[in-house]
Image: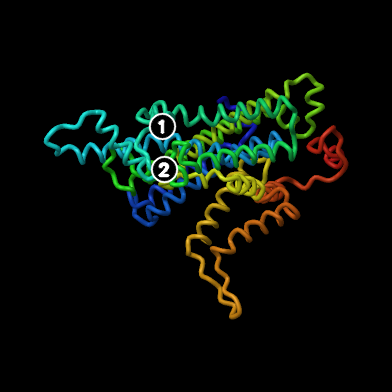
Amino acid sequence: MNRSFFAQSPSVLVFLGCLGLATLFVTVLSEAFGIGVLSTSFIKTLGKTLCLCLIAVAMDLVWGYAGILSLGHFAFFGLGGYMIGMWLMYERTREIVESSMSDAVIPPTPQEISDAIGNQIFGVVGSSEFPLIWTFADSLTIQLFLVVAIPGVLAGLFGWLAFRSRVTGVYLSILTQAMTLALSLYLFQNESGLRGNNGLSGLQNLPGVEAGQDVVSMWFFWASALALGLGYLLAARVISGKFGSVIRGIRDNEQRVRFLGYAVESYKLVIFAGTAMIAGIAGALYYPQAGIVNPAEIAPIASIYLAVWVAIGGRGRLYGAVLGAIFVSLVSSYFTGGQAPDINLGFYTIKWVDWWLVMLGISFVLVTLFAPKGLGGLVDLWEDRRRPDRHGADLGPDAGALREKEAVE
C-alpha cells in the first residue's frame, strides 16, 4: 500500500486504528490476559461479532457497490464453518479414541482406530464409515484451503450460469435464495455426510491444545480482529481503484458499462466469487467460537438477516456495514440472551426473546423509509458539521467545485 491510497481513504486508517484500540482494550479487560472484567462468554460474543462484521463487509461489496442483492452469502459463511469443523471434530475425536485405547493390552491397529473414530462421529446418524467428503479431514492444510476453495467454486459456478444468462435484479436474488435453500435441505439429510441436522459439534475444543477456553477465546478474538482488518483493507483497496469504479458503474447503469466495452459478466463473477471466499473465512473463524455448525445456519433467513444488517448500517459504505453488524449482533445478544427484563403490561407480558425479530423487522422498514443511509449517515452528519458553510452557485462541474461567493471573496 502506498501513501496515496491512505491519503485518498483516511477512513481506512481511522477504522484500523479503532479496531486496534478496541482489540487492545478487550485484551486488557479479558480474563486470560487482563484484569478479568470481561467474561469468556462475552469475549466469544465479541469475537463472533467481528466475524459477522467481516461477512457484512463482503455483503456490502457485492450489494452496496456492485448492486447484486445476494440472498445466499450466508451459505458460503456456513460452508467455511463446515470445512474447518470437519478437521476440528476429526482430530478431537481421534485424541479421545487414542487416549481411551492407550491402556489396551494389544495396541490397536490404525484401521481399528479409524473405525472407532468413524463410530464416534457418525454413530448419531446410524453409521460408522467415513463419507468421501471426509477424505482430507485429517489434514489441516487441505481443510484450510477448502475453506476458501469450496465457497469460491460454488459461487463461481452459480455466478457463471446466472450472469452469462444476464439474470439481474429480483430474479437473481430469488435464484441465490433458491441455491441456499437447496443446499440447506441437502445438508439436513444424513446422506450428506455431515451428520444431518445434528451438524458438527464440539468445535470449541482445539486439538492438541491444553489451554483453557479463556485463552482460546482470546486467540480466536485476535484472529477475528486480524481477519476483519485485512478484509476491510482489501475491500477498501478494491473499491478505490478502477475495479471499484467499474462495479459501481454496473450498479448504477449496467447497460451503459456494457456498451463502453467492459466485460460486465466477468466483473460481476469476480466480485461474487471473491466475496464468497471472504464469507468462507469469516465462517471458519465464527463457528469454532460458537462451538457448533448445523444446516439451520445456512437457511435462507440467515442471508436475509445479513442484508438487513448492511441496510441498517448503510450500504455502499464499508464502515456502515461494520456498524450495522456490530449494532444488530450486540443488541440481538442482549435481547435474546435473557439480559433484557420482560415487561408486564397486566394484560400481556412482553418477552423480548419473542419480540426481537419483530423489532429487527420494524427497524429495517424505518431505516429504509426514513434513513436510507443507515447508521453510516451519522458519520456524514458529523463530517458536514466540520465542513465550512459554503454558499452560492457552483462554478465547476461538481458540487465540490469553487463556489460563487468564495470566488468573490
Q: Which residue is mark 2?
A: 200
Can you give x and y, in whole percent of width and height, for residue 322 in the image? Answer: 58, 45
- Does residue 217 appear to the left or right of 323 in the view shown? left
Q: Which residue is mark 1?
A: 131
Can you give x and y, in whole percent of width and height, for residue 32 in the image? Answer: 32, 49
User: Which residue type carries mark 1?
Assistant: Pro
- Does residue 132 appear to the left or right of 277 in the view shown? left
Can you give x and y, in whole percent of width and height, for residue 22 in the image? Answer: 47, 47
Colouring scheme applied when the structure was drawn: rainbow
Residue 383: give its label.
none
The residue nearer to you, when weighing 231 against 2, is 231
Dot 1: few (<14), some (14–19), or many (≥20) neighbours within 10 Å?
Answer: some
Can you give x and y, in whole percent of width and height, for residue 183 in the image? Answer: 56, 38
Secondary structure of the residue carrying tag 2 is strand
Quarter-of-image position of residue 267: top right
User: Which residue type carries mark 2?
Assistant: Leu
Disc 1 to disc 2, C-alpha distance: 14 Å
Q: How many marks?
A: 2
